Image (cartoon, grey):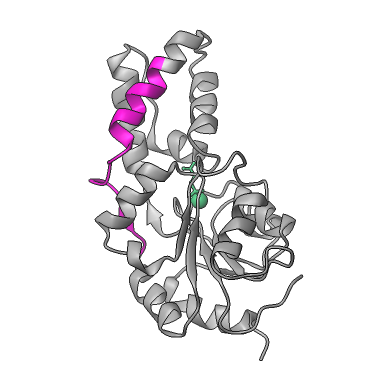
């Protein structure tokens, strides 16, 4: 595992890590399904489909609803995106996120976003919560040809934050199987937020430390750093 000295680049996942966005994703999915006279899904079903980006979300939805026609799938995704690109009404920051980000920024750590959410809704939600300026780089699910769990987006995030591209240094903060696999592939330490959209028990995901309250994050970051 690569170690990092302060100031250390810190990359954050978005959905299920900084924000609880599943209610807005659920609402946009169901509006698209209704528009095309399809059955709707529960919040917990949709929450379980988040993490791999929009293509994975809709692959899961069409499998669950047994929708096989490619034209219908394309129309559903277009209808979804027309709502999702600026959906913020039902989305909340997890408690303590702003305070933790400000503490880490004040300590001089360069901060970035590495999400599988497409860039347009990502930028929209960061601006909505007035936290966009805290991040030196924002890599979305459609910013590069690769998505998490491919390590490339996280490597690019750290490189954009000043890390040597050939020897990535940094810390990743995320919530899911996708994030755990990505951090392990770079490799960098993962700080796992346990209140997000993970499927498996915490013990089954490779991680450096786990936390359920953002108030604990600054101390966990300090614990990773070499002095
Ligand atoms: O939108 C998704 O499916 C995943 O987004 P995340 O990478 O921020 O968890
Ligand atoms: Mg996530």
Nearest to the observer: residue 215 or residue 85: 85
Depicted 6 relative to depicted 136: above or below? below
Tell me the quarter of the picture where residue 209 sits: bottom right
Identify the residue at horizontal 60%, vertical 69% (top origin).
Answer: 171
Q: Is residue 6 left or right of residue 212?
A: right
Identify the residue at horizontal 39%, vertical 32% (top origin).
Answer: 42
Q: Is residue 10 left or right of residue 99?
A: right
Nearest to the observer: residue 123 or residue 36: 123
Depicted 94 relative to depicted 162: above or below? above
Quadrant including the C terminus = bottom right
Q: Is residue 60 magenta?
A: no
Which residues, given as a range, are shown in magenta?
75-94
Q: Residue furthest bottom?
A: 227
Where residue 102 sits: x, y (%)? 37, 77
Residue 177 in view in this figure: no
Give the number of marks.
0
Identify the residue at horizontal 44%, vertical 70% (top origin).
Answer: 213
Where residue 183 sits: x, y (%)? 67, 59
Where residue 128 sits: x, y (%)? 25, 55
Residue 119 in view in this figure: yes
Tell me the quarter of the picture where residue 158 sits: bottom right
């Amino acid at each position: 595992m690569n170690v990092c000295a302060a100031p250390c680049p810190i990359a954050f996942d978005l959905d299920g890590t900084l924000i609880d966005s599943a209610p807005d994703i659920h609402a946009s999915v169901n509006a698209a399904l209704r528009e095309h006279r399809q059955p709707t899904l529960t919040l917990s079903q949709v929450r379980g489909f988040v993490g791999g980006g929009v293509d994975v979300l809709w692959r899961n939805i069409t499998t669950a609803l047994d929708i096989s026609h490619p034209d219908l799938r394309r129309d559903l995704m277009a209808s979804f995106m027309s709502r999702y690109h600026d959906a913020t009404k039902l989305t909340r920051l997890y408690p303590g996120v702003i305070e933790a980000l400000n503490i880490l920024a004040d300590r001089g750590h360069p901060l970035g976003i590495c999400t599988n959410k497409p860039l347009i809704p990502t930028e929209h939600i960061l601006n909505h919560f007035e936290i966009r300026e805290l991040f030196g780089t924002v890599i979305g699910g459609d910013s590069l040809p690769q998505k998490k769990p491919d390590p490339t987006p996280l490597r690019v995030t750290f490189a954009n934050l000043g890390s040597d591209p050939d020897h990535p240094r940094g810390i990743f903060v995320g919530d899911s199987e996708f994030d755990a696999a990505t951090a392990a592939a770079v490799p960098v330490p993962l700080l796992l937020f346990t209140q997000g959209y993970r499927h498996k028990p915490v013990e089954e995901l490779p991680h450096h430390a786990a936390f359920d309250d953002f108030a604990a994050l600054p101390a966990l970051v300090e614990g990773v750093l070499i002095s």
